[in-house]
Amino acid sequence: MHTILDYMKWRGDLTFEERHFNAVDCLICSIISYFPFEKAVKDPDVVLTLEQLYHKMIENNVREKDFLMFNDVELLKQLVKSKRYQELKLTRFVSVTNLDKEKQFAAVTILLPNHYVYVSYRGTDDSFVGWKEDFNMTYLDVVPAQQSAVQYLNELKAKFMTKILVGGHSKGGNLAIYAALHCQNKIKSRIKHIFNYDGPGFLKDITESPEYQRIAPMISTYVPQTSIIGRLLNCNEEYKVVKSNQKLVWQHDYFSWEVDVDDFVYDDEVDPTSNLLDNIISEWLGTVTLEEREQFIDIIYRSLLTTNASNFKELDLKGIKGIKQVLKMLEHLNKEDKKVVNKVAWMFFKALKQHIF
């Protein structure tokens, strides 16, 4: 099976004029926002090629562990060497993590040929606050990263406002749709397409709004065969199913997606496991109030923070000691919090039992 790393070997020596910009290129542009540029770039408005960014990372001692995915390092090296990508320019580097606001946001603007720009929104990193913000979407109409995504798009300078593509992977796909939905009309009129790679949906109030229906034809959504993240909440737009070489939630890894020459390799529909998990999660959330969702998520988040880790890599390094710390905190909850945890957990197992047994 071939992945985007193979695609770079096949198409890396061809310019965009020689071979058209396609859905795989758009995924790669979405992945670029995951690169830890904030550790190497101090001026957000500087304009850099990928090669210049790579050298700045080396100069600033950015290491493999600073990248979200191990293969991101190899992809960046291939992009730097490729005729297709080496001359693309990046600018508007923004990365903000705010624990008090429970916000994790990052984006970069990529200058493409033929007067196009690709506004690339980063998905969730491995920080606790990043995942907390994701789960906040299950009970909030808007989260801070979504507000920042709109502001980022609205601040696109006139010289870049020619033809705009917006996209992202995971939460980045959600941010791309939300920003395109709520940006100023002068920006919205320039948006040619929106790319959502396995990003979660929205609460019904958003997906059923007339504004959402107007931009829906511009959205291309891609999910793996056993999509879980990309089917959370409500997603009214059509989606294409991409074959993956992984199982279950690990299919969310974009390096597992199958590629063939100029496009992904598609399946006719998601597999039964994806439908089963979607039904379980949808029914579970439907039996829990928004207030209970909020309280339950806050409790789990507070328990993770008691480990003094800030992300899942650090928690993993703590091993069994970190898990014991989380369990200890849950054991000493007050009566009201225990009641909420027990109810939410019971409702989950009830939905699980109904759909599996």
Image (cartoon, helix red, strand yellow):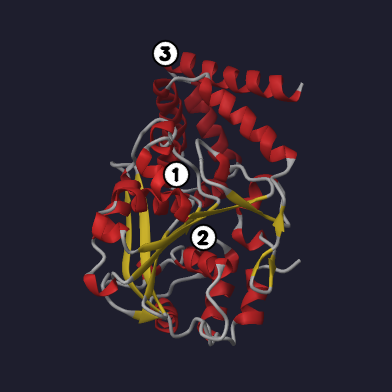
Is 230 on the left-hand or right-hand side of 62? Answer: right
In the picture shown, does residue 196 fall above or below 99?
below
- State the image coordinates of residue 20 (x, y, percent, origin top left): 55, 78
Mark 2 is surrounded, within 10 Å at the Cα level, by few (under 14), some (14 to 19) or many (20 or more) other residues, namely some
Residue 306 appears in the figure: no
- Amino acid type, mark 3: Glu
Can you tell which mark lies on residue 261? none
Callout count: 3
Quarter of the image containing the N terminus? bottom right
> Does label 1 or label 3 sit earlier along the sequence?
1
- State the image coordinates of residue 250 (x, y, percent, origin top left): 65, 50
- State the image coordinates of residue 142 (x, y, percent, origin top left): 33, 39
Mark 3–mark 2 CB contact (< 8 Å): no
Is 186 on the left-hand or right-hand side of 67? Answer: left
The residue singled out by tag 3 in the image is 336
Residue 159 appears in the figure: yes
- Disc 2 is placed on an element classified as loop
> Does label 1 or label 2 sit earlier along the sequence?
2
**Residue at (61, 42) in percent of width and height:** 228
The residue singled out by tag 2 in the image is 68
Mark 3 is surrounded, within 10 Å at the Cα level, by few (under 14), some (14 to 19) or many (20 or more) other residues, namely few
Please tell me in which quadrant of the rendered image residue 213 appears.
Answer: top left
Q: CA distance from mark 3 to mark 2?
A: 37 Å
Can you tell which mark lies on residue 128? 1
In the picture shown, does residue 20 fall above or below 167?
below
- Amino acid type, mark 2: Leu
> Does label 3 or label 2 sit earlier along the sequence?
2
Mark 1 is surrounded, within 10 Å at the Cα level, by few (under 14), some (14 to 19) or many (20 or more) other residues, namely many
